[in-house]
Image (cartoon, grey):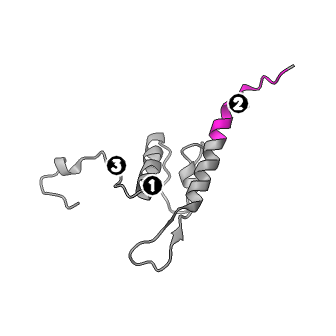
């Protein structure tokens, strides 16, 4: 006799990703020029929404249910953590008549 519950086997990597991402996001702190102390982000659940069905966001925050926008958000947060600029595929500098400041 053996266990034939394939759903649990398929969910295991997703659960591991949720745990690792939660731990990473709980460790991230930030500080802007006007802040005296480092702060944590409001809620890691917003970032975990990439892997979950319904995102939980703080009150007043726009709800993003698009997978690729959520993925881009996570990628840009991770890029910021290592000091890289965010990826911006709008290419506004090539579409605007007047030069845009970086």
Of all residues shown, which one is farthest toward the bottom? 36
* Label 2 environment density (alpha carbons within 10 Å; few <14, some 14–19, many ≥20): few
| Residue 42, image quadrant | bottom right
Of all residues shown, which one is farthest toward the right? 1
Numbered mark located on residue 9 in the image: 2
**Helix, strand or loop at mark 2:** helix
Q: Report the predominant secondary structure element of the magenta stretch.
A: helix
Residue to which mark 3 is pinned: 87
Q: Label 2 to label 3, Cα distance in Å?
A: 34 Å
Q: Was residue 6 drawn as part of the magenta stretch in this picture?
A: yes
Numbered mark located on residue 77 in the image: 1
The N terminus - image quarter: top right
* Label 1 environment density (alpha carbons within 10 Å; few <14, some 14–19, many ≥20): some
- Residue in the foreground of this view, choosing between 1 and 7: 1
What span is in magenta? 2-15
Question: Which x, y percent locates residue 52?
Answer: 60, 43
**Helix, strand or loop at mark 3:** loop
**Helix, strand or loop at mark 1:** helix
At horizontal 51% and vertical 62% (from top left) the residue drawn is: 60
| Residue 24, image quadrant | bottom right
At horizontal 14% and vertical 57% (from top left) the residue drawn is: 99
Q: Label 2 to label 1, Cα distance in Å?
A: 30 Å
Q: Earlier in the sequence, mark 2 or mark 3?
A: 2
């Amino acid at each position: 006799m053996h266990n034939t519950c394939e759903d649990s086997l398929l969910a295991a990597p997703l659960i591991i990703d949720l745990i690792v991402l939660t731990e990473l996001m709980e460790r991230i702190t930030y500080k802007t020029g006007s802040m005296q102390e480092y702060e944590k982000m409001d809620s890691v659940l917003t970032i975990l929404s990439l892997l979950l069905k319904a995102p939980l966001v703080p009150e007043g925050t726009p709800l993003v249910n698009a997978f690729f926008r959520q993925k881009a958000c996570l990628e840009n947060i991770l890029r910021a953590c290592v000091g890289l600029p965010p990826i911006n595929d709008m290419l506004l500098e090539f579409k605007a008549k007047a030069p845009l400041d970086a």
